[in-house]
Image (cartoon, rainbow, N blue to C red):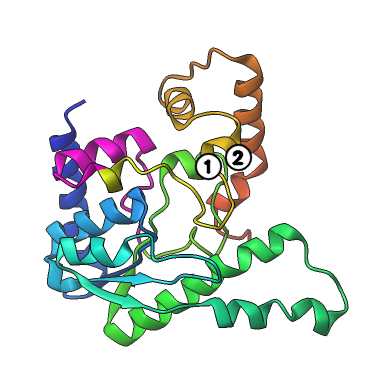
Amino acid sequence: MDYNILKDSCIEWIKNWFEHNGKGCRAVLGMSGGKDSTVAAALCAQALGPDRVTGVAMPSNGQSLNEADEICNHLGIKYLCVPIGGIATEFGKISQASGEELSVQAEQNIPPRIRMTVLYAISQSEGGRVVNTCNLSEDYIGYATRWGDGAGDFCPLGGLTVQEIRGIGHAMGLPSKWVDKTPDDGLPHSCSDEQKFGFTYEVLDRYIRTGVCDNPAVKEKIDRMHRNNLFKLSMPDKFEPGL
């Protein structure tokens, strides 16, 4: 695959999207320090110009900036840091107020949804459009928070696998330490995404693109995760009265 062609096509797509959905607007995105936000920010900077891109780091309790500030500086884009630990702590009091204990997954999904609220507040104030930085690989198995990192106004990486995003990152000349960084949730004492999944992104990406998976157990797990999370990829169903 020619990643230079893929990169140029994505940049052109971003230009066209803004021409029709926000002429003169800024791109606003969360900067986690991972490959997705790094590559998405770089693509937006080339498509719109660095002066029209805002990167926002939003560390929660126990999370570091993960070099988000360095990445924004490298790309020449505006950098903001909005720590959300205090907000997340207040949200954690929901269980006290309701008398019901929040599930572990519910607690884990609070920070991503806070981050999206922060991004939309900044975007609306700056006259911007929020970038969804999810990729095809993660979306395929539902590894995104609905109305959290799974939200946004446009999604430049949504049709690209992890391997393809890395290829674009290298084609853009981005440092390997960011493009090839092992994906994880950034939490203390956590593990990599691939350890959580029980399979690698390389295996997942090959299955998505070719339908081939050598391990039947892994294939079944991927299929099950995909089926169980399809609802995240669609807008809510609505009643149509037929009037």
Query: Pointer 1: residues within 10 angstroms few (<14), some, or many (20+)?
Result: some
Left-right relation of 12 to 137:
left
Amino acid type, residue under disc 2 in the picture: Lys
Report the residue at 26% width, 74% height from top.
Answer: 79
Q: Is residue 15 visible?
A: yes
* Quarter in which the C terminus is drawn: bottom right
Q: Residue at x 32, y 63 (%)?
A: 68
> Does the stretch in magenta take in 164?
yes
**Could you tell me residue 145's position as x and y percent?**
57, 58
Label disc, if present, on residue 47 of the rendered structure: none
Vertical relation: 45 (above or below) 227: below
Residue 23 visible (yes or no): no
The alpha-carbon separation of the residues under discs 1 and 2 comes to 5 Å
Q: Secondary structure at mark 1?
A: helix
Q: Quadrant of the N terminus?
A: top left
Q: Position of residue 78 (x, y in %)?
A: 21, 74
Label 2's element?
helix
Residue farthest right in this picture: 99
The amino acid type, in three-letter code, at marker 1 is Asp
Q: Nearer the viewer, residue 38 or 40?
A: 38
Find residue 23 and report its horizontal and vertical position in percent: 18, 72
Which quadrant of the view contains residue 179? top left
Look at the image and give the residue range highlighted in magenta: 154-176
Query: CB atoms at circles 1 and 2 under 8 Å apart?
Result: yes
> What residue is pinned by disc 1?
193
Q: Left or right: where does residue 126 sit relative to residue 82?
A: left
In this picture, is 232 found above or below 59? Answer: above
Q: Residue furthest bottom?
A: 125
